[in-house]
Amino acid sequence: MQPERFPPDDPREWMNRARSNLTRARVGVGPGVYLEDPCFDAQQAAEKSFKALILYRGLVFPYTHDLAELLTILLQAGEGVPEGARQAGRLTRYALVTRYPFLSPPVTRQEHEDAVGIAEAVVRWVEEQIGYRS
């Protein structure tokens, strides 16, 4: 079942998208799938979650894949970000160099599991902050 759609400036729509990416990150491993692809979905889940919280707090975010930059916006706004979510900067590489052949070594299963764990921590924390879960 598809989640309810909201306007693009509504944090709930960003969280719906984040959860969609997180689902793909979790189940995207199988025959013929490069682990880089579900790791990109994990990065996107964290990115869209951070952007949802930034919107929810009435702030403006840049259109960037740099999770450290988005995290800095939240920290500078006084957000108490838990350690699990602070690890999100590690996912930025999955939006950049791992998406193209030969720019980095292949992603390992352990790296994929770590990426999903970090994304799950970010999504769960942001859901608690904005009080929304579809």
Image: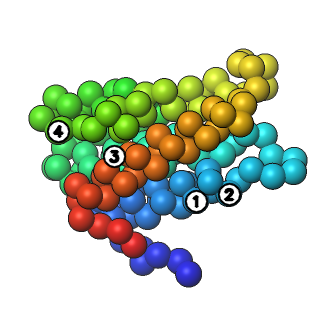
Amino acid tagged 2 = Val
Mark 1 crowd level (few <14, some 14–19, many ≥20, 10 Å Cα): some
Q: Earlier in the sequence, mark 3 or mark 4?
A: 3
In the image, residue 109 lies at what x, y percent? 71, 36
**Secondary structure of the residue carrying numbered label 2:** helix
- Label 4: element kind: loop
Marks 2 and 4, how far apart in space?
Answer: 31 Å
The residue wearing badge 1 is: 23
The N terminus - image quarter? bottom right
Amino acid of disc 1: Thr
Is 19 drawn above or below residue 25 in the view shown?
below
Using the numbered discs, state the Cα–Cα distance from disc 3 to disc 4 in whole angstroms: 13 Å
Badge 4 crowding class, 10 Å Cα cut-off, few under 14, some 14 to 19, many 20 or more, is some
Above or below, 12 against 114 in this view is below
Q: Residue at x 64, y 38 (%)?
A: 112
Q: Which residue is mark 3?
A: 51
Farthest bottom residue in view? 1
Contact? badges 3 and 1 (CB < 8 Å): no
Q: Earlier in the sequence, mark 2 or mark 3?
A: 2
Closer mark to the observer between disc 2 and disc 3: 2
3D distance between C-alphas at marks 1 and 4: 26 Å
Q: Earlier in the sequence, mark 1 or mark 4?
A: 1
Asked if the residue at tag 2 contacts the one at tag 1, i.e. Cβ–Cβ closer than 8 Å, the answer is: yes
Residue at the disc numbered 2 = 27
Query: Can the viewer see residue 18?
Result: yes
| Mark linked to residue 79 | 4
Q: Residue at x 76, y 26 (%)?
A: 106
Type of amino acid at the residue the image marks with label 3:
Lys
